[in-house]
Amino acid sequence: MSDTQVATSEAEPGSTPPSRKGAVGRLMRATEVDPRLLGMIVALIVIWVVFNIFSDGKFLTSRNLWNLSVQTAVVGIMATGMVLVIVTRNIDLSVGSMLGMIAMAIAILQKNILPDWLGFDHWAIWIIAVVAALVIGAIVGAFQGAIVAYAGVPSFIVTLGGLLIWRGVTWSMSSGQTIAPVDATFQLLGGGARGSIGSNWSWVVGIVGCLAVIALLWNTRRQRRRFDFPLRPMWAEILVGAVGCGAILGSVYVLNHYFKPPTLANGRTDVPFGIAVPVLITLGVLLVMTFIANRTRFGRYVYAIGGNPEAAELGGINTRWMIVRTFMVMGILVAIAAIVQVARLNAATSGLGTLAELYVIAAAVIGGTSFTGGVGTIPGAVLGALVMQSLQSGMVLMGIEAAYQDIIIGVVLVAAVGLDTYYRKRVAR
Amino acid sequence: MTTTHDPANGSPLVEMRNMRVAFGGVHAVDGVTVDLFPGEVVALVGGNGAGKTTLIKTLSGAHPADSGEILIDGRPVRIETPRDARALGVETIYQTLALAENIDSPGNMFLGRELTTSWGTLDDSAMEDATRKVMGRLNPRFKNFKVPVSSLSGGQRQSVAIAKAVHFNARILIMDEPTAALGPAETAQVGELVKQLKSEGIGIFLISHDIHDVFDLADRISVMLQGKLVGTVNKHEVTMDEVLAMIIIGKMPGEVSETELEELHG
C-alpha cells in the first residue's frame, strides 16, 4: 500500500516523541491517537472493572451505566468551559453559586411569574425559561470576565467574590425556600422517565454518530491529500473508524437495555429508556466546545494566550476581549448545567450547586488541564467528569461511607495530577 | 516591492524622527532620529537600558511613542498596535521570539492572521502547507510541523520566528538580538538569511550586543546611550574601537581622545 510508505518515510526522526517503541508505539503512531486521552480511557475502564468486581457485578449494568451517564451531565457540561478558563491561566470559582442563582431564577420564573402572565402549563414557558437562563449566564460570565480582563483583578478574587455574591443572591431570591415544581415540558430536559428518547431514536443518534466519525476521517484524509501530506495507513483509518463506531453503537446498546418500570410503560417491562436528554445535551456541548477549541480562531487564541500571553498580544490578538469571551462561554455553560439540574430535580433549592465548582475544576484537571496554562482538552474534561462520577457511584454501590468517599476522591485527584506531571516531565526530556 | 539597492540615492523606507518614550519620569527614548533605506541593514547598538528595544517597539506597534513622527515611504503613519505595523509591512522578530510554546509551528507562524476555510473555520492544512513551503527555503531539514514549538531546538524556534516574517513579505524587518540564543552554526545561518533578505530589498533594523555580528551584517550603525542617540556612522568609516567608544562613553569618532581609547582596553 503506497499510503503506508508515505507515512513511514515521513514519520522519521523526531516527528513523534521517541519514548514510544515497539508494536504499541507503531500502533499509536499509525492511528495518531492522543496518548493521554487513551491513558484516561484505559484508566476509566480499569476503574469500571474493579468496581464491577467489588460490587458483585452491580457496576457494569445498563441500569447503573445509564444513571452514571445522567449524573455526569451537569459537571461534564461545566467542565468543558472550565478547560478554556484554566487554559487562559484563569479560574472560575463562582460556577457552583452561579448555577444555584440561575436555577433559582428560572424556577421562580416558571412557578411564580410566567403562569400569571401566560397561564399554567403554557407551551412557551420552557422556552422562555431556557432563554432566560442562557442570557443570565452570558451576562454574569461576561461581567466577571470584564472585571478580570479590563480592571486587572485576578480571576481567583473576582470569582471568589462571585461565589459569595451569587449564593447570597440565590438565598435572597427565595428567602431560603425550595421552589417546586417546574414546567412539565421543561422537566424533560433533566432526563428521568419521560426525558429519554427511547430505543429507536437512540439508534438513530448512534448511526448518525457513526456516519459523522466516518465523514470526519474521510475529510481529514481528503485534506491531507490536497496538500500531499503524509496519510494515515488505510488499516489505521479503518481501525480508528471501527473502534469509534463500535464504542458509539455499544453505548447505545447498553443504554437501550435499561428498561422502564411497568408503572411508566403501561405495565410492560420491555420498554427501554434509551439515551437521556441531558446526556444528549452533554454530547452536543462536547461537540460544539471541541469544535470551538480546535477549529475556530477564538479557540486558537485561547490556547495562544495560555501558552504565551505576550506572544498573543504581539500577534495582534485582543487578549482582553478573548478573556471576556472565555468567561462568557463559561457562564452560558453554567446556565445549561443549571437547566439540566433544575429539570432533573423538578425544583430549585438555595443550596443547589454548592461545591460544584470544586468538582468541575477537579474534572478538568483530572482530564489533563494544566494550571500553568495553555494545556487541556475538552474531551479530556468530560472524561474527567465521568471518572469522578464513576468513583462516586462505584463507592456508593460498594457501600463505602460518605466520609471515606471524599477522602478517596481527594487522593485520586492529587494522584492523577501527580502522575500527569511525572509523565509530562518524562516526555519533555 | 522596491528593488532600490543603493542607500545613497533612493528615498528612505523608514524615518523615525525625534522619538520620545518615557516610563514614569525616566526617558527611555529621548528625541531619537534614525532612518533605514531599502536593502540596508542598520544596527542599533548600545548598552543595557540604552533604549534600543523601546525605540524599536514604537515601530513594531508593541509600545506607543509619547511623541515623534514615523514616516514610511516618506508618508507619516500611525502605529499603535502590532496589527498597524504589520499592515504597513513591518515584521518583528523579538528577542524572546514571541512564540506560543503549546502551539505547533504553523499555528505560531499564522498567529493572529490565521487562514480560514470558506466556513470561517481554521484551515490547518493550508497553514501547514504554507509553513512547509517557507521552511523548505529557510531550513530544509525542518520536519516537525505538528509538535508544539516547546519541543523544538533553539535554532528551529528561531526559524519559525523568521519564517513568519518571510512568509508575510516583510518590507521592513526588525530583528531584536536574533542570534542571542543560537550556536555558531545557527548564527551563521541567520547571517546568510539577513544577506539574502537584504538582496531582496528588505530594510532591516538589527539590534545586537555582539559587535562582531554588527560589523559583519550592518551597513550603518546607530549608537544609543541612556535613551539618546549618540550618532549614526557608516560601517566602513569606523573601527570597532570607535564604535565601542560611542557605546560606552558616548563620544563620536574624532571627539574621543587617545587616552580614552586606551582606558576602554584597560
Image: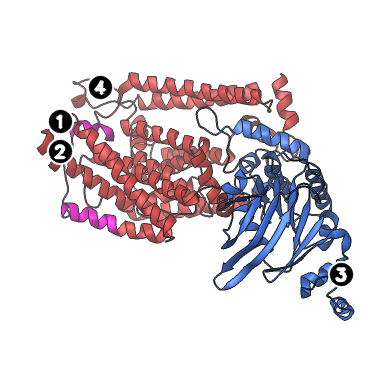
Chain under callout 1: A
Residue A354 or residue B49, whichever sits in front: B49
From the rendered image, report the letter of the chain displayed in blue: B
Q: Which residue is mark 2?
A: A114
What whole-number distance in Å separates the C-alpha atoms at marks 2 and 1? 9 Å
The quarter of the displayed image where residue A73 is located: top left
Q: Are marks 4 and 1 in contact (CB under 8 Å)?
A: no
The answer as to whether the residues below labels 2 and 3 share one chain is no
Residue type (three-letter) at the residue carrying disc 3: Asp
Please identify, in this view, whether the residue under mark 3 or under mark 4 is nearer the observer: 3
Q: Earlier in the sequence, mark 4 or mark 1?
A: 1
- Judge the density around disc 4: few (<14), some (14-19), many (≥20) Cα neighbours within 10 Å: some
Residue A171 is inside the magenta segment: yes
What is the secondary structure assignment of the residue under circle 3? helix
Q: What residue range appears in magenta?
A: A165-191
Q: Earlier in the sequence, mark 2 or mark 1?
A: 2
Chain under callout 2: A
Please identify, in this view, whether the residue under mark 2 or under mark 4 is nearer the observer: 2
Residue type (three-letter) at the residue carrying disc 1: His
What is the secondary structure assignment of the residue under circle 2? helix
Q: Which residue is mark 1?
A: A122
Q: Which residue is mark 4?
A: A269
Q: Are marks 3 and 4 in contact (CB under 8 Å)?
A: no
Q: Which residue is mark 3?
A: B241
Residue A157 spot, x, y in % from top left = 39, 61
Can the viewer see residue A181? no
**Is residue A184 found left or right of B102 in the rendered image?**
left
